[in-house]
Amino acid sequence: MEIIAQNGTIFIGLAVVFGLFMTWGIGANDVANAMGTSVGSKAITVRQAILIAAIFEFAGAVLAGGRVTETVRKGIIDPTPIMAEPQLLVYGMLAALLSAATWLAIASLKGWPVSTTHSIVGALVGFAAVGIGGDAVHWGKIGVIVASWVISPVVGGGLAFLVMTSIRILILDTDQPFRRARALGPFYLFLVGFLIALVTLFKGLSHLHIELSVAGSVGAAVIVGLIFGVLGRILIGRVKVDPQADRDFHFASVEKVFAPMMIFTACSMAFAHGSNDVANGIGPLAAVLSIVSSGGEVAQKAGTPMWVLFIGGVGIVLGLATLGYRVMRTIGTKITELRPTRGFSAELAAAATVVIASRTGLPVSTTHVAVGAVIGVGLARGVGAIDMRVVGGIVLSWLVTLPVGAGLAAAFFFVLRGIFG
């Protein structure tokens, strides 16, 4: 308690700096892989992706992310044994932030799309193992995360394969693909709006005093889907056949129909990401604030001030703007060649996978889902359309995320304890 009283301001300052570093890493890596399909298919530019992220990541975090953040992410560790020494948890949260942020920076420089959730979880495990004891780690939860390495890309890839196949059968393989694309485009956009609204409502908006039943949530999602469909029809109606482009590539005009549709998916993915994963950066920060402000009391959940959400939003946008292009390039161009129809299929499948996971408890990573979805649309063209060397490098980066995060966090914990202890 005395250490916290003496160094509280320093701890908060470090938490803010490390939290900003962490959310910068989330922007450079996680947001980048969510935007990679839209940028890679040339539906939007990098500058437009940054603008979309700035608006919709903020909206997702504030409207659907909630104002209460788990201080010990997803119940991975049990801090009970160190309740009498809360400064150890402060060191651990700071070490976890710095560890996960460092790994995300390294992965982003390499262009590897890794899971920010797994990065922070690995860091918490590393701190707990050396700072509390191995028994403080809920190893069953770690097993679930390991299972997600397989489940996430398989489900995301399978759904993307089905969506891309439906586009090929219903649109591309018909006598009048452009007319079919204009007719069916609003229906596909209805699915995007419906799925994103459904996952947002299923997560709950209790902090906005909105409580809906399952039937009410479905009804509201249908309304959002219809709005997406109507707006989509207006935009699609402005797309005209380009005979010159069609001579060079038979489906050029069809791809132009799907390009404005991907603006909707990009906005939706940014909103969904903001509501889900900003907590990875601000959760440990909220924990430090809670412990310091309470004089040493350890809580499993803590209120998140608006300025903390603002830090998270600023960090994310800066990360995407400065280094995000590397991961966007991997997702959008290196795994397989993307066009708007393929990018749209991948993002629709990713949204559907998140909805399924939120209702069934499937352990999925949004990053792994996104990569799996891109692989799925590639498989719709055949295995030869996928660069397996790139996929192998990505999978390897997934496998080392937990142990690297744990090792770095353990080292940083000892350094912080040595400085302040």
Image (tube, rainbow, N blue to C red):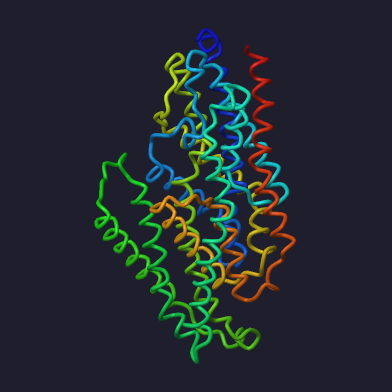
Q: Where is residue 227 in the image (x, y as percent from the top left)?
A: 33, 65
Q: Is residue 38 visible?
A: no
| For residue 106, side relative to residue 218 (left or right) | right
Q: Which residue is drawn at 71% across and 57% down?
A: 392
Counting labels gives 0
Would you say residue 267 is visible in this rendering?
yes
Residue furthest top in the image: 2
- Extreme-bottom residue of the structure: 175
Residue at figure coordinates x 53%, y 80% from the top left = 168
Most foreground residue, 378 or 269? 378
User: What x and y, as percent, mark residue 414?
Assistant: 67, 21
Front in this rendered view, residue 323 or 108: 108
Q: Determine whether 290 is above or below 267 in the image.
A: above
Q: Where is residue 45 in the image (x, y as percent from the top left)?
A: 59, 61
Task: Give the side of residue 413 with respect to residue 389, left or right.
Answer: left
Relative to 215, say whether 413 is above or below.
Answer: above
- In the image shown, does 65 or 215 lie closer to the viewer? 215
User: Which corner quadrant holds the C terminus?
Assistant: top right
| Image position of 184 with respect to 148: above or below | below
